[in-house]
C-alpha cells in the first residue's frame, strides 16, 4: 500500500492515504482542541467565525502535543514521505482550520522554497469527514509536472527593483500562480475535489497546484491540519529566494528542532492566528 501511494504521489502529484491516523488519535486531538478553546476563550475569539470555527491557526501543534502526536502517528503517510525524501520526514510548520480555507489554486513553492529544491511535502490530515458540503481540498492532477517557469524573467516583470525582492508579496505570489494557471490551461489540466474521511491524509508534491473549495454548509465544521514537512535541517525560504534561485543562502535551517517520540519538530516560539495576531507558545502551554 505504501508503494501505491508513493507511485500516486509521483505520478499525479498527490496521494490519498486512507486511515493514515486512527480514529482514537483524531478524537484525542479534537478533544484537546475543544479544551484549549474553552481555556483560552478570549484569545481565540477574534479568530473565530459566528459558529466558533477557527481559521488558519499557524503552529497550534506547538501548544497541543495531541497535534504533534497526530503527526508522528500518521505512520502510513510518513512512510511515503520518508521514501520521497530518502530520509526521515520532520515537521516544519502546521495550519489548523475548522472551516474551509477557500484558497484559490496555488503552488506552495514560493513560500516553501527549500534548498535543495523540492524537499517539502504538504500533508493534510482530515479530522472530520470532508465532502462537497464543507470545503474539500481541490487538486490539479499532473500540475507538478508542467514545464518549468522562468522565475527570474517573471521577477523582472513583477519587481522593478531586483535588489530588494521582498520575502512576502501578494503581487509576487499572485503573479507566479497566474503563470501556473496559464500553463495548466494550456496543457488541458483541470481541478478535481478530494473527498476524504476522518483520519485520511492527503500528501501533495511541492509543485502541486491545489486550493480549497467553497465551504457551503457553514455550521458544519471542516477540521483539518496541514502539516508542512521537510527532512530535518532543510532550510525553507520565501519569495526573495524563490525568485532568485542563485542567491547565496545558508544550506542549513536557522531554527532548532525538538524530539517528539521518534520524529523531529521545528521549534518556534509563537502561534499565529489567521495572520491577524500572535501569541507566545509559552503562554498557551501554561500551566
Ligand atoms: O485546506 C485547504 O483548503 C487548502 C490548504 C492549502 O492550500 C495549503 O495549506 O496550502
Image (cartoon, rainbow, N blue to C red):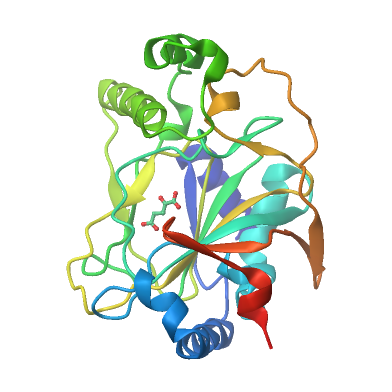
In this rendering, position of residue 62 left or right of residue 232: left
> Is 97 placed above or below 213 here?
below
In this rendering, position of residue 170 left or right of residue 228: left
The N terminus, quarter of image: bottom right
Q: Where is residue 51? Give x, y as percent.
A: 26, 80
> Is 118 placed above or below 154 here?
below
Which residue is found at the position 70% from the left and 31% from the top?
115
Q: Where is residue 9? Give x, y as percent.
A: 53, 45
Q: Where is residue 237? Give x, y as percent.
A: 62, 35
> Is 140 placed above or below 226 here?
above
The C terminus, quarter of image: bottom right
Q: Does residue 105 appear in this view?
A: yes
In this rendering, position of residue 46 left or right of residue 258: left
Towards the viewer: 160 or 77: 160
Towards the viewer: 69 or 283: 283
Tell how many labels. Answer: 0
Which quadrant of the view contains residue 90?
A: bottom right
Q: Does residue 129 appear in this view?
A: no
Which quadrant of the view contains residue 45?
A: bottom left
Towards the viewer: 203 or 50: 50
Towards the viewer: 171 or 188: 171
Which residue is found at the position 35% from the left and 25% from the top?
175
Q: Where is residue 251? Give x, y as percent.
A: 79, 31
Which residue is found at the position 62% from the left and 43% from the top?
120
> Is 21 placed above or below 180 here?
below
In this rendering, position of residue 210 left or right of residue 83: left
Amino acid at each position: 500500500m505504501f508503494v501505491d501511494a508513493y507511485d500516486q504521489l509521483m505520478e499525479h502529484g498527490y496521494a490519498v492515504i486512507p486511515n493514515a491516523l486512527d480514529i482514537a488519535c483524531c478524537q484525542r486531538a479534537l478533544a484537546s482542541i475543544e479544551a484549549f478553546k474553552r481555556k483560552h476563550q478570549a484569545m481565540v475569539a477574534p479568530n473565530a467565525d459566528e459558529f466558533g470555527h477557527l481559521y488558519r491557526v499557524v503552529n497550534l501543534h506547538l501548544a497541543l502535543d495531541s497535534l504533534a502526536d497526530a503527526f508522528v502517528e500518521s505512520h502510513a503517510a510518513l512512510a511515503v514521505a520518508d521514501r520521497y525524501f530518502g530520509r526521515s520526514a520532520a515537521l516544519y510548520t502546521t495550519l489548523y482550520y475548522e472551516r474551509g480555507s477557500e484558497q484559490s489554486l496555488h503552488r506552495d513553492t514560493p513560500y516553501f522554497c527549500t534548498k535543495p529544491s523540492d524537499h517539502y511535502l504538504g500533508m493534510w490530515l482530515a479530522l472530520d469527514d470532508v465532502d462537497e458540503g464543507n470545503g474539500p481540498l481541490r487538486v490539479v492532477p499532473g500540475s507538478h509536472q508542467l514545464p518549468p517557469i522562468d522565475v527570474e524573467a517573471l521577477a523582472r516583470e513583477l519587481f522593478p527593483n531586483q535588489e530588494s525582492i521582498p520575502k512576502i508579496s501578494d503581487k509576487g505570489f499572485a503573479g507566479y500562480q497566474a503563470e501556473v494557471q496559464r500553463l495548466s490551461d494550456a496543457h488541458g489540466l483541470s481541478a478535481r475535489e478530494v473527498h476524504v474521511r476522518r483520519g485520511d491524509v492527503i500528501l501533495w508534491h511541492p509543485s502541486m497546484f491545489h486550493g480549497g473549495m467553497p465551504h457551503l454548509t457553514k455550521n458544519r465544521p471542516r477540521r483539518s491540519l496541514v502539516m508542512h514537512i521537510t527532512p530535518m535541517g532543510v532550510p525553507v525560504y520565501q519569495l526573495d529566494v524563490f525568485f532568485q534561485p542563485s542567491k547565496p543562502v545558508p544550506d542549513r535551517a536557522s531554527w532548532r528542532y525538538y524530539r517528539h517520540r521518534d520524529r523531529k519538530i521545528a521549534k518556534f516560539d509563537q502561534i499565529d492566528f489567521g495572520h491577524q495576531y500572535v501569541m507566545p507558545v509559552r503562554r498557551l502551554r501554561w500551566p
